[in-house]
């Protein structure tokens, strides 16, 4: 990648635009050389959910409207799965046969597994950023059409550009929102060696479709550090650690002062974020209330058969709410009904599982867990109330932290790995800039305070990256998207 040439514009007219397309939420900012202007993306909020909803007429809505529409149309709706037609197959080629007569050619429909929801009014997509580095996932099915991942995120980026253009019309008449510095994690999720290249290519293409023709790209933790330095221009810190802990990734970088600027000493990123934490809590807190670990009894030919209920077969689909409707197949629902019919103390647990499956409640449950997690950032305990599946619990912060112990350990290892890459000790860090929604978890803050006592600064968890990206474009720090 090469440096962008936006710096050739006159300083008096140049504006930096920063686009933070996040896993869970997105934000955008404008920098005029002196001030950061955060752009409202929702009527009462600077940020917007990174969500898109496509209905059966293939009309798209984004942000909170996408989520509200999905909930309104799907919560409490019984899911009905039909047979999917994959395509057509010919039984013969229609060529001349042995007796000199043309062979009869016939065409038959080829059917797939029964997982098409015939009553579904629309599809909600959220967290698509986590799939951008998956070369093996080029498209997702939306009813009978295959949508490229690029097409699913471009409407979100378009809405962000339109919001910026509206602000520019008042702020700098004649200025066009056709350029931006777009943030990216240090490492996208993906197992392929070129997963970062694949993800950046897709993000660049989607941004072009949205109208951001002149593109720069910049790592998100560096953007957070830039934003911090802009707010604290007189900081004497010589060595800075930026920790960006968001919904899908954990990104870290160490910067060391070199004259009036900072040079990157180390950069590190792992696939750990708020979504992973939510899944861990769902698994440990709610799975036992839905039948995990219970015995499955049913009649055999000559005796009663008792085996552990095969809950493992359900887990991945439950934890991935976008495809949890696939549980509405006989192979999944029949064992649950049998477990309910056997009665006993476990029957009510399997009723919860059945309601979750038949009423398509996975997304609603995840939202309840996110709300609980947010409450525990401010209080020592929180209520988890999900009447749709008859769950009411009081969860303490200590219980929550025990459930995410593995993720907290992974967080601490990532911090240690970053220090090792820079070949410095924790004591050499002058300031730690902590940002991202998951940085608000008290256990995360305590971990940082333990390693860097008195040096941790919480910096605009949801908007600092967008602000830093705007600064990066204004100062021409990003790399051009032309070679992505």
Image: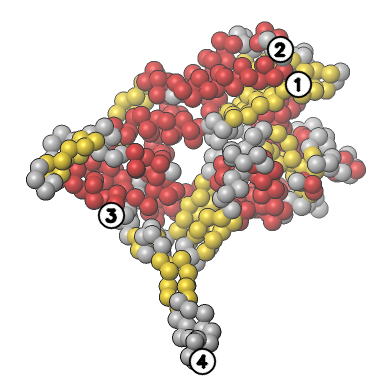
Q: Which percent across, then down, holds residue 90?
A: 48, 76
Q: Is residue 20 left or right of residue 479?
A: left
Q: Observer-nearest residue: 353 or 338?
A: 338
Mark 3, secondary structure of its residue:
helix
Disc 3 to disc 4, how far (Cα)?
A: 49 Å
Disc 4 to disc 1, how far (Cα)?
A: 78 Å
Say if 203 sits above or below 222 in the image: below
Name the residue that disc number 1 marks. 265
Quadrant for residue 27, please give it: top right
Q: Pointers 3 and 1 in contact (CB under 8 A)?
A: no
Quadrant for residue 453, please give it: top right
Tell me which numbered mark, 3 or 4, is placed earlier along the sequence.
4
Disc 4 to disc 2, how far (Cα)?
A: 83 Å
Name the residue that disc number 4 marks. 100
Q: Which mark is residue 330?
A: 3
Q: Which mark is residue 424?
A: 2
């Amino acid at each position: 990648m090469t440096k962008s040439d936006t710096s050739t514009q006159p300083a008096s007219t140049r504006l930096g635009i920063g686009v933070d397309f996040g896993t869970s939420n997105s934000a955008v900012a404008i920098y005029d050389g002196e001030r950061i202007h955060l752009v409202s993306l929702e009527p009462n909020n600077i940020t917007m959910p990174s969500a898109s909803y496509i209905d059966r007429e293939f009309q798209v809505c984004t942000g909170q409207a996408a989520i509200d529409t999905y909930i309104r149309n799907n919560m409490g709706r019984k899911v009905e799965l039909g047979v999917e037609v994959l395509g057509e197959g010919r039984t013969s080629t229609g060529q001349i046969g042995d007796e000199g007569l043309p062979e009869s050619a016939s065409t038959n429909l080829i059917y797939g597994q029964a997982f098409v929801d015939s009553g579904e009014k629309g599809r909600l997509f959220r967290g698509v950023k986590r799939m951008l580095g998956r070369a093996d996932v080029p498209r997702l099915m939306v009813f009978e059409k295959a949508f490229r991942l690029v097409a699913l995120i471009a409407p979100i980026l378009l809405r962000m550009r339109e919001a910026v253009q509206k602000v520019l019309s008042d702020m700098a008449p004649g200025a066009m929102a056709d350029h931006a510095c777009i943030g990216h994690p240090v490492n996208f999720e993906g197992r392929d060696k070129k997963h970062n290249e694949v993800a950046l290519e897709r993000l660049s293409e989607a941004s072009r479709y949205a109208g951001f023709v002149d593109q720069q790209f910049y790592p998100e933790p560096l953007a957070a550090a830039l934003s911090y330095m802009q707010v604290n221009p007189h900081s004497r810190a010589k060595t800075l650690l930026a920790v960006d802990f968001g919904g899908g990734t954990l990104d870290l970088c160490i910067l060391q002062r070199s004259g009036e600027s900072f040079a990157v000493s180390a950069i590190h990123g792992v696939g750990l974020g708020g979504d992973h934490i939510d899944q861990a809590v769902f698994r440990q807190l709610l799975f036992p209330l839905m039948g995990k670990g219970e015995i499955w009894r049913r009649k055999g030919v000559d005796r009663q058969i008792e085996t552990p209920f095969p809950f493992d077969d359900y887990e991945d689909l439950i934890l991935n709410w976008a495809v949890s409707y696939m549980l509405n197949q006989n192979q999944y629902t029949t064992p649950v009904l049998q477990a309910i019919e056997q009665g006993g103390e476990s029957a009510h647990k399997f009723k919860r599982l059945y309601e979750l499956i038949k009423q398509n409640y996975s997304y609603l449950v995840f939202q309840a867990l996110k709300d609980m997690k947010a409450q525990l950032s401010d209080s020592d305990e929180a209520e988890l109330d999900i009447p749709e599946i008859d769950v009411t619990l009081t969860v303490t912060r200590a219980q929550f932290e025990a459930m995410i112990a593995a993720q907290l350990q992974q967080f601490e290892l990532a911090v240690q790995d970053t220090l090792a890459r820079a070949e410095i000790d924790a004591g050499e860090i002058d300031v730690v800039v902590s940002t991202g929604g998951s940085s608000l978890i008290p256990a995360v803050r305590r971990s940082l305070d333990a390693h860097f006592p008195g040096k941790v600064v919480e910096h605009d968890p949801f908007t600092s990256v967008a602000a830093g990206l705007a600064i990066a474009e204004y100062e021409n720090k990003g790399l051009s998207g032309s070679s992505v």
